[in-house]
Image (cartoon, rainbow, N blue to C red):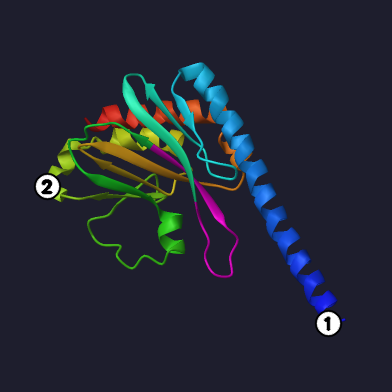
Amino acid sequence: MAIWIVSGLMALLLLTYYGMIYIRKLQFDTVNDNFMELEDELGGKVNRAGFASRPSFTTLYKERKATISISSEKKPGEERQYYINLTMQAQSKASFSLLSSQWVQEENDTETDNQMIPMLDGQFLLRPTNPAKLHHLQTPRLEKVLPELAPFVYILASPTGMILERSSTNLKHDTRPKEMRDLLAAMLKLAKLTE
């Protein structure tokens, strides 16, 4: 009798596990479909390694290599958080980070220092790697582009490229071609402002 109970529980656990994998696959299938539409519009290539793996999209956007991918983070006691990552080829004159103030507070980042410059009424923080090169950044013009990039967690810029990470609660909606085109256009604006 006990063996039947244990077998039943194991079967139930196994079905639950496969059900979760299938739901994840369906979610990533939708993102893959969105990236395929983007591929049709912009050219490029959609990469997907396997059954339930995360897709990515690489293209040459206005003569700049750009890649959009998905990542996630699971903190103890919290739901899994998904992120949309955009990397773009750029040659920034100054290395810097743009951080969401809300994200800094949520992460309990105690490293906020006097080198951080509040932007857009404190919604974002600009942290130049070398404050002496701050004059290369046109901060009033940067502030005008930030609403087009928001909501983002952070943007890292260096002489070799830029990385943006955007939090997502609805990957199906947030990876639609229109959303991704708008994000690519805004990132290109930011790249041109920093060069």
Amino acid at circle 2: Ala
Give the left or right position of residue 162, taking residue 55 as reference.
left
| Among the two numbered marks 2 and 1 on one chain, the one whose residue lies closer to the N terminus | 1
Residue nearest the observer in this picture, 98 or 43:
43
Vertical relation: 148 (above or below) 15: above
- Picture disc at residue 50: none
Which residue in the structure is indicated by mark 2? 132
Place of residue 160 in the rendered image (x, y in percent of width and height, measured from the top left): 22, 36
- Picture disc at residue 2: 1
Q: SS of the residue at dot 2?
A: helix
Quarter of the picture holding the N terminus: bottom right
Quarter of the picture holding the C terminus: top left
Place of residue 103 in the rendered image (x, y in percent of width and height, measured from the top left): 44, 56
Place of residue 11 in the rendered image (x, y in percent of width and height, measured from the top left): 77, 65
At a point 55% along the width and 54% down the height, the residue shown is: 81
Give the left or right position of residue 118, taking residue 172 as reference.
left
- Which stretch is magenta? 72-86
Amino acid at circle 1: Ala
